[in-house]
Amino acid sequence: MSDIIRRDPRAEWIARNRLHPLHAEMAAPAAETRGPSGLIRKNPHAVGFIGPNGIKRIDRSGGSGAAVGIRRGARSAQQVELPLHTVENPDYYVVAVLDMVGGRLTSHDKDVLGQAHKLIRGGDGSGAVLAVVFGEHKEEAFDKAGVDRLLHLTGSEFDGYCPEQKVACLAEVEKQYQPRYWLFPDSINGGNELGCRLAARLGERPATQAWQVDRDTSVCRGGGGLSDITRDTPRLLLLAEECADPIDETRHQVLALELDRKPRIINRLQDCGQVAVDPNSVSLAEAEFILSAGNGIHDWDQFHQAAEALGATEGASRVAVDDGFMPRFRQVGATGTWVTARVYVAVGISGAVQHMQGIGQCDKVVAINTDAGCDMVKRADLSIIGDSQKVLAQLIELARDYREGGAENAA
Amino acid sequence: MANAEHLKIVALVSVGQHPKSGRARRAEQDARAVELGLNLCGEKVQVLHAGDVAEESLRSYAGMGLKQLRVLQQAAGADASVALGDYLSEHLPDIVLTGVRAESGESSGMTPYLLAEKLGWPLVTRIADIARIENGEAEILQALPRGQRRAIRVRLPFVASVDNAAAAPRQSAYGPGRRAELENLPWVETADEVRAAFEEAPARKRPKRLKMVKAKTAAERFKAATAKSQGGGGRVIKDQPPHEQAQAIFDLLLEEGVLR
Ligand SMILES: Cc1cc2nc3c(=O)[nH]c(=O)nc-3n(C[C@H](O)[C@H](O)[C@H](O)COP(=O)(O)OP(=O)(O)OC[C@H]3O[C@@H](n4cnc5c(N)ncnc54)[C@H](O)[C@@H]3O)c2cc1C
């Protein structure tokens, strides 16, 4: 539907015709009229509208005053298209190498992109932010995060741990695009390592843990976090979290760029894969995948089996802990641990605020609950309405099949 | 633990700083590097520092059971990584162990990278342990975020930075630390000119980012302040047999790559 505001002549006509059976609906009495003595009169009955629950609502923002005879094509207020920021033929590039944990932009990545635009804004010439992404990704919102140009390097050579291969590619980017700035997130998810490797390769002296950066000076955390170092802004920066505000008011082009020559080198570090770690030895705050139990669990042996079969770290709500089914250090929430898991599966947890506080930073929440109206289901990205015991039994089976199948494929 | 008695292992140490009091101490990660070295080849591990031999906190490394600790004499404004690089390319050890980030000074964590680049050796970052050394090849456990570990194989010689996940350093004994020999080696100094231009000040508290509500009208602001978190685009699966429901969860876990 279009956004064009259209007059409805029929409605206008009915509004003028007091004898029309539909007149009362079409002609909401004017809120302001001139009285017989010439004074402005306000009709308190005419303001507002009747809400869906039958209660009168007054909206003073003027957003929803249904004007007679005027019909909007669509609910336009909801999806405002952000203005598109375009850069044609950029004079220079600011390169941001992104972490992309789990194939998506992290909040740290978004801060770095925001910083990249901050370095360009108000400067001479037109600069474009070139984001470098290694390997496959699942991100769809590069445009809203401020990516003008995207260099997406894929291929089997980027599978697994391959910092040397990546740095060789970045050195090639340096040759081909000669970026004005190199920005990396100073994170343990690879940004710090790649940045330092590239700095050593290019012979640049990077600013690390930089948290306040403009074109002239940068402020960096030094001395184990006890001091601030103010220095001239170098070409290569490793940025701390929340160094700048992420982009949220513009869309960007995300034009794909290519690397002319893709170097392929022999990795001296041979990746032998991740080592199996007992998920319950990982601290709850750090765990990546948590299976959490609440008052809706009736078969605790089965729950422990499920956690083991899935390879998840166990968590619990306060009720499960208070009732003695789980140890205190497994409690998630305001008085327990604040978790940062990427995937949080809440089994039989209603979602009390105290519990929700603890999972504020989780990416994907899955709820298994018998009550479709509970708060956990409202928060969850995927909700299963059903009995926890039956669903967990099926999950255990699936996980075991998967592992056996994997073993067969490997053999 | 790997048997590596015949190997030349150098652990680089710096002067640490207590995170609260700021007092000089042995640096946490460097001490772990020394510990790893001691476990690999006993007392033969060479512990090396570039700086001032009079520094008291060096004694607490020596107190971990070292007979001797070598110091490349450097003034305060000198670039230690240059001196260390020169020393190492002269002596060519098999393994160089460092911390990830120093606790004082610039704290940039660049030293292992610069050394590896200068020596032309591979660098393994954030290691938790060296599991095995055989036929000139080491099997290393690397610490990953979220308590995970990755196995890496690399040929000797190499540089490795030791993470906080490595074995905790043994206690330092005061008396042996006093008695240990600190060997002072005068060394060429390279002034660190970039650093001279730095202004250092006690860390300022960083403002916390506030949740900005970009609302144009009072009604929108009110809504933002009071609204409960909405179930966004959450998918709800209801009235289906349990195995289909479980399959939906399982697919999500697979897609997110959390099943191993
Ligand atoms: C000061 C204070 C601090 C607190 N701190 C915390 C905290 O840190 N962490 C915390 O978790 N809580 C905390 N609480 C408690 C919190 O308010 C809730 O009481 C608690 O989180 C509820 O736990 P629950 O969801 O497991 O139990 P319930 O609220 O009883 O929910 C059980 C859920 O399981 C579902 N269910 C029942 N049977 C089944 C079944 N067979 N299959 C599937 N689903 C089923 C039900 O529909 C229900 O939604 C705190 C409370 C206070 C007052």
Image (cartoon, coloured by chain):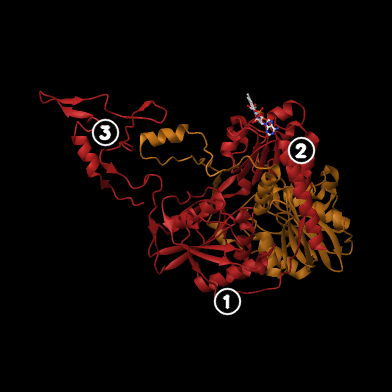
Chain colours: A red, B orange
Marks 1 and 2 close (CB-CB < 8 Å) = no
The chain ID associated with circle 1 is: A
Give the x, y percent position of residue B213. Answer: 43, 40
Q: Chain of mark 3?
A: A
Would residue A8 appear left or right of B131 to someone viewing this image? left
From the image, tell me which residue sits under label 1: A261
Can see residue B100? yes
Specify which label sits upstream in the sequence, 1 or 2. Answer: 1
Q: Chain of mark 2?
A: A
Question: Does mark 3's beta carbon lie closer than 8 Å to ligand 1?
Answer: no
Q: Which is nearer the eye, A83 or A220?
A: A83
Locate residue A367, reporting x and y percent.
Answer: 64, 39
- Quadrant position of the N terminus of chain B in the picture: bottom right
Could you give the CA–CA distance between mark 1 and mark 3, rounded to whole angstroms? 72 Å
Residue under label 2, please give it. A303
The residues tagged by marks 2 and 3 sit, at their Cα atoms, a distance apart of 62 Å
Q: Residue at x 28, y 32 (%)?
A: A25
